[in-house]
């Protein structure tokens, strides 16, 4: 049997702000707060929906701000029946910001309150005719 992802860990300067953003964005719950062996603050979020296989998220305090683009990022999908533009707007209202929204791409790139980029899969948005839709590409690690 192969190993499996236990958690996705995000380093951030302001653990409370970033974990609150992601808890609201993904409807996760804070399940634990602690200081690790180095005295750094940590917050654990869990989706509590085992049937969906949602990984837990851990937010760990770091001293330095992100200096370069993420080498790994999260991709999220808009819930069925919800307009992609509504979900992007909700995420912006929670503290995210739009980084890129190319009309020929089925993704909108956003950043969380500390600038960690993530993609929102918007699929075929209503403002684009089907012929203009770009094929769905697999996520890449940049």
Image (cartoon, grey):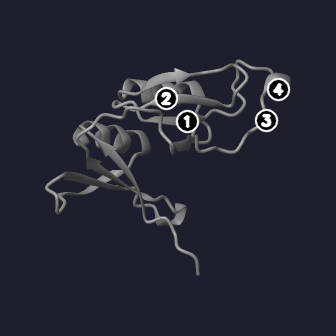
SS for dot 1: strand
Tell me the residue that label 4 is attached to: 130
> What is the spatial separation of the Cα atoms under label 2 and label 1, in whole angstroms?
6 Å
Residue found at the far right of this picture: 131
| C-beta proximity under 8 Å, tags 1 and 3 | no
SS for dot 2: strand
| Precedes in sequence: disc 2 or disc 3 | 2
Q: Is residue 1 placed above or below 134 in the rendered structure?
A: below
**24 sits to left or right of 38:** right
| Within-10-Å neighbours for mark 4: few <14, some 14–19, many 20+ | few
Q: Residue at x 72, y 30 (%)?
A: 124
**134 sits to left or right of 97:** right
In the rendered structure, find residue 75 and report the number of the disc placed on it: none
**62 sits to left or right of 51:** left
Query: Of tags 4 and 2, which is closer to the observer?
Result: 2
Q: Quadrant of residue 47?
A: bottom left
Tell me the residue that label 1 is attached to: 119
Tell me the residue that label 2 is attached to: 110
Pick the quarter of the image with the N terminus.
bottom right
Query: Of tags 4 and 1, which is closer to the observer?
Result: 1
| Within-10-Å neighbours for mark 3: few <14, some 14–19, many 20+ | few
> What is the spatial separation of the Cα atoms under label 2 and label 3, in whole angstroms?
20 Å
Question: What is the x, y in percent for residue 16?
Answer: 23, 41
| C-beta proximity under 8 Å, tags 4 and 2 | no
SS for dot 3: loop
| Precedes in sequence: disc 1 or disc 3 | 1
Tell me the residue that label 3 is attached to: 135
| C-beta proximity under 8 Å, tags 2 and 1 | yes
Q: Residue at x 23, y 37 (%)?
A: 14
Q: Nearer the viewer, residue 31 or 105?
A: 105
Q: Quadrant of residue 85?
A: top right
């Amino acid at each position: 049997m192969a190993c499996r992802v236990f958690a996705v860990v995000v380093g951030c300067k302001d653990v409370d702000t970033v974990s609150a953003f992601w808890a609201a964005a993904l409807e996760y719950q804070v399940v634990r707060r602690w200081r690790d062996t180095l005295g750094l603050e940590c917050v654990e979020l869990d989706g509590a929906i085992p049937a969906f296989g949602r990984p837990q998220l851990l937010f760990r305090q770091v001293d330095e701000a992100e200096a370069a683009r993420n080498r790994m990022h999260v991709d999220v999908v808009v819930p069925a029946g919800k307009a992609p533009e509504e979900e992007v707007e909700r995420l912006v209202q929670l503290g995210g910001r739009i980084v890129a929204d190319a009309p020929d791409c089925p993704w909108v790139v956003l950043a969380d309150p500390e600038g960690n980029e993530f993609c929102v899969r918007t699929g075929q948005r209503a403002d684009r005719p089907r012929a203009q839709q770009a094929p769905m590409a697999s996520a890449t690690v940049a």
